[in-house]
Image (cartoon, rainbow, N blue to C red):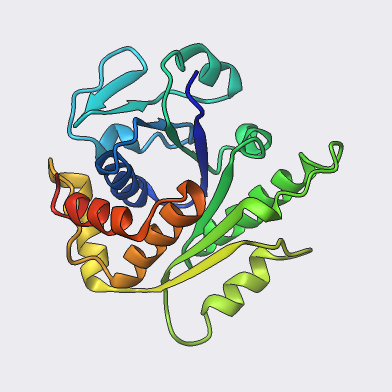
Amino acid sequence: MTDTIRLGFAGSYKCDLILYLSGILHNAGKKVAIVDASDEQLFQYCLPVLFASDCMVTYRDIDAYYKIKNEDDYRSVMKEEYEVLLIDIGFNKSMAGFLRSMDYCIFVTDPEIHNVQKMRDFISIFNESGKEADENKSENSVRIFRDMCQGKIGYKYISSIIDSPASMNYIGEYVFLLDEVDRRLRLHCQYDHIFKFGRLSKEYKIMFADMLDTFFGMSKKQIKKSIRKAERGR
């Protein structure tokens, strides 16, 4: 039986990050699948394939599951075995408890006030879901701040809202400033049939390298090779 590493992603738009990471892992020789368990079901629009009436499509050797709204849906459709599952939960509150079962939890937000408030509410439910089991998930949680701006509405201000009433501890934290090239690549990722990200900010690639090292124990040589192939769209 395959030992599966499950990465759970919560928060605002992150389809591009998941697609980049899935390509990197695929080039590292991993059998990867994407699971869209968000309310918005954005992968139906981001993948350049015709979504049929079932719950799974395959694009460039990576399976993508959609129409997953709760844990029952997840269990009913996940019949294949994978080495890595990238599960996008978005702000789906019914899956907040399920997120606690992930090997690693990745929380993503941007400065948009509605996303910041949604993230605060989601994390509150996430924390409440573990009280009975007295679980501490801070040892496997990462958070990502995207499109941050200089000035008043900066990283520290956003953190003060999300961390109310109590902050979590994270094994990793990444802050990315608003960048036109990164934004353009994000849009291309929605429209193009092949995902290329060679011009993505090096800070993102450093984050991917950290994840491959921390989550999968890959060597520096394997990490560099996998990222280089994936960013060329292979």
Residue that lies at the very extreme toward the bottom in this rendered image? 151
Between 157 and 223, the one lying in front of the other is 223
Residue at x-position 26% and y-position 64%:
183
Looking at the picture, how far across and down is residue 173, in whole percent? 54, 67
Looking at the picture, how far across and down is residue 9, in whole percent? 50, 45
Residue at x-position 41% and y-position 63%:
207
The quadrant of the rendering that contains the C terminus is top left
Looking at the picture, how far across and down is residue 35, in whole percent? 42, 31
In the image, 193: left or right of 165?
left
Quarter of the image where one finds residue 97? top right
Q: From what the image shows, is residue 38 above or below residue 125?
A: above
Looking at the picture, how far across and down is residue 81, in whole percent? 43, 20
Residue at x-position 55% and y-position 60%:
143
In the image, 113: left or right of 59?
right
In the image, 90: left or right of 225?
right
Between 62 and 126, the one lying in front of the other is 62
Q: From what the image shows, is residue 48 above or below residue 196?
A: above
Q: From what the image shows, is residue 21 above or below residue 55?
A: below
